[in-house]
Amino acid sequence: MPPKTPTPRSDELFRNQLDNMIDMEHALVKLAGLIDWSRFEEAYGPFYCQKGRPGLSTRLMAGLHLLKHMEGLSDEAVCARWVENPYYQYFCGEQYFRHKLPLDRSSMTRWRNRIGADKLELLLAEMLRVALRTGAMTPSSCERVTLDTTVQTKAVAHPTDSHLLMRGIEWLNRLAKQHGIKLRQSFLRLGRQARRDVSRLIHGRGHKQAMRWVRKLRTWLGRLDRDIGRKIAGDPALEAAFTVARERVAKILTQKAGDTDKLYALHAPEVECIAKGKARTRYEFGVKTSIAVTNARTAGGQFIIGMQALPGRPYDGHTLTGQIEQVERLTGIPVERAYVDRGYRGHKHSGKARVYIAHTRGIASPTIRRELRRRNAIEPIIGHTKSDGLLERNHLAGATGDAINAILVAAGHNLRLLVAWLAALLRALLTAWLSLIPPRIAAA
């Protein structure tokens, strides 16, 4: 059911109004007044059912997600901080200070999954609109963009063979216990000991012995799977309950080292192995993500004007057209020049935007050469999304979670820049105002 307008309470006179408690010149307060919250209510209103329990406020849910990704917090942490931070409550549309959260943490998960990544792009588009309105970003800066790809790593353990095989044994035992199936042998004790021995021997002189333990783990998992298959045969309910687990276990048992479509996490089959050529990290496990930022450093910093997850490990050049289209869709400004690295060679982009590849010789224009040298400035932006944002370890489930997290990370990065820009602007205005006051009055 759509959210209802809160009715006045009988004790309103004795409650603490937020505008009497907080500094109304705070950057987060000013930003809350600049955001057009009605856009979210109009866009997300059709996702609410017309019957049932009244839904939560759209501004509350959108504000919590923006604050979460601005600070790089988890759902639990941002909910806990909302209760004790009056500025967070004011940003989310509260009029009075509240001592209890009006929702459960799981409501955030259900809300963003219901909205989807496509509609959540509106949060990023609104942050860009506010940046243009406040002068933190100019329209001309959206015409010249820098593009690159990175890896949005998933919150999974490093996928070693012994770890995956042991996780399969534990998963099948857990399901068998839930459904009351008595196993011939659980292999839990033997499997844990074998995994410890593999960890101890694999990187030393006992490599052959470690591989023998890995083969034993694979044998034990196969025996356990066959034992369960015999005992659930003919029972459609049990077969349906074990379908997902047995399919993924079968994939682990049959996959080889040189296979392309491998399973790296039992609970996250969408995880991919991506090699970006880094010396410190040869392989990263997650999904490739494309990012577009303004080429010129604007007054408020370098804003992210486009970001999207790219499942399937596509070639960078094939992602160029889709990323430019997203930038033009979010900003409403056509891209004239796009600057990329040498990983985009052979892109065959057919749009109106001119694409310039790094380390290209024969460019006569000094402006384009200068902007091409600024292409490297996208690397620290990617670093900020991973260290300050939530791009480094994505905890959202499934491929849909990858797409949602990418959009919200970009919106949170822009929100951080806007808060810093408004705070600096207010300080500059205060300094200019104090400079006009005579020294004697200012000292008094």
Image: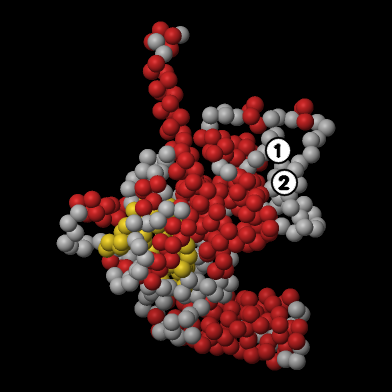
- Relative to residue 111, is residue 408 drawn left or right? left
Q: Residues within 10 Å of mark 1 (few under 14, many from 20)?
A: some
Residue 401 location, quadrant: bottom right
**Marker disc for residue 232:** none
Secondary structure of the residue carrying tag 1 is loop
- At x 77%, y 27%, the residue is 13
Q: How is the image coloured?
A: secondary structure
Q: Badge 2 is on which residue?
A: 102
Instruction: Tell me whether the residue at label 1 lies in contact with that at label 2, contact meaning CB atoms closer than 8 angstroms.
Output: yes
- At x 46%, y 43%, the residue is 131
- Relative to residue 161, is residue 302 drawn left or right? left
Real-space Cα separation, disc 1 to disc 2, in angstroms: 9 Å
Q: Is residue 99 above or below residue 244?
A: above
Residue 149: image x %, image y %? 39, 63
**Marker disc for residue 98:** 1
Q: Farthest front residue?
A: 352
Residue 265: image x %, image y %? 53, 73
- At x 77%, y 52%, the residue is 54
Residue 177 location, quadrant: bottom right
Q: Residues within 10 Å of mark 2 (few under 14, many from 20)?
A: few
Residue 396 visible? The answer is no
Secondary structure of the residue carrying tag 2 is loop
Between 167 and 184, the one lying in front of the other is: 167
Residue 76: image x %, image y %? 62, 51
Between 76 and 294, the one lying in front of the other is: 294
Residue 176: image x %, image y %? 71, 80
Disc 1 marks a residue whose amino acid type is Arg
- Relative to residue 57, is residue 396 drawn left or right? left
Between 28 and 46, the one lying in front of the other is: 46
Disc 2 marks a residue whose amino acid type is Pro
Residue 242 visible? The answer is yes
- At x 40%, y 66%, the residue is 321
